[in-house]
Amino acid sequence: MSSPRLGSGKLVIATHNAGKLREIQALLAPYGIECLSAGALGLPEPAETGTTFVENALIKARAAAEAAGLPALADDSGLCVDALGGAPGVYTADWAEADVFEGGPGRDWYMAMGKVEGKLAELGPDARRTCHFACVLAIAWPDGQSAVYEGRAQGTLTWPPRGTMGFGYDPVFVPLGDNRTFAELDPAQKHAISHRADAFAKLVADQFSA
């Protein structure tokens, strides 16, 4: 059975991450879809209890679709470092969890990048620095149907972090074929080669092709 199709109209983007929201909105802009963020709708963030990107993306998309009564798109993505056995992987955001003074729990991405670099340093100067960003885009409909699209961006890690235009681990990720980090690339350049763009190209081919 073929997957359901998105039409023009409203789509909930199931994220509270402003950087992810901007990227997804930019990718969807040509398709006449009105993006509503889960944060703006006041939707709670469900517990990401899955052990894979696919499981967590579906958890978020299904929760948003059910709560809003609209189709919902969720992203689950992360950095997978070869020398660390694929870590941090699905726990990418967890590595950034920190207690923010007077603000409760928050995310410190510089700390998270430092953790990755520290673990590589423990392995010695010959540790492989190859890695990839993985992205799964899941669409869920209020009737329970869903579709999943997976993408990757291959690269290597650099240190110290460079650039100010990305988010998350972007300042230490150098995509294959370039010498700049994702955070040093203009957003349009990053959108063209990112793991999210790879997954989104598959989504477009399935959802919007004639």
Image: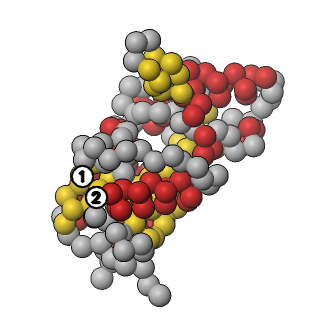
Q: Which residue sits at x=54%, y=28%? A: 96
Q: Which residue sits at x=49%, y=50%? A: 76
Q: Which residue sits at x=45%, y=70%? A: 147
101 vs 125, left or right, is left
Farthest residue toward the bottom?
1
Q: Nearer the viewer, residue 44 or 26?
A: 44
Q: Which quadrant of the figure has residue 143?
A: bottom left
Q: Is residue 31 visible?
A: yes
Q: Which quadrant of the figure has residue 83?
A: top right
Which mark, residue 36?
A: 1
| x and y percentages locating residue 151 in the rendered image | 52, 58
Q: Amino acid at mark 1?
A: Leu
Q: How is the image coloured?
A: secondary structure
CB of mark 2 within 8 Å of CB of mark 1? yes
Q: How far is mark 2 from mark 1, CA to CA?
A: 10 Å
Q: Which residue sits at x=61%, y=40%? A: 91
Q: Amino acid at mark 2?
A: Ala
Q: Secondary structure at mark 2?
A: helix
The quadrant the C terminus occupies is: bottom left
| x and y percentages locating residue 132 in the rendered image | 60, 46
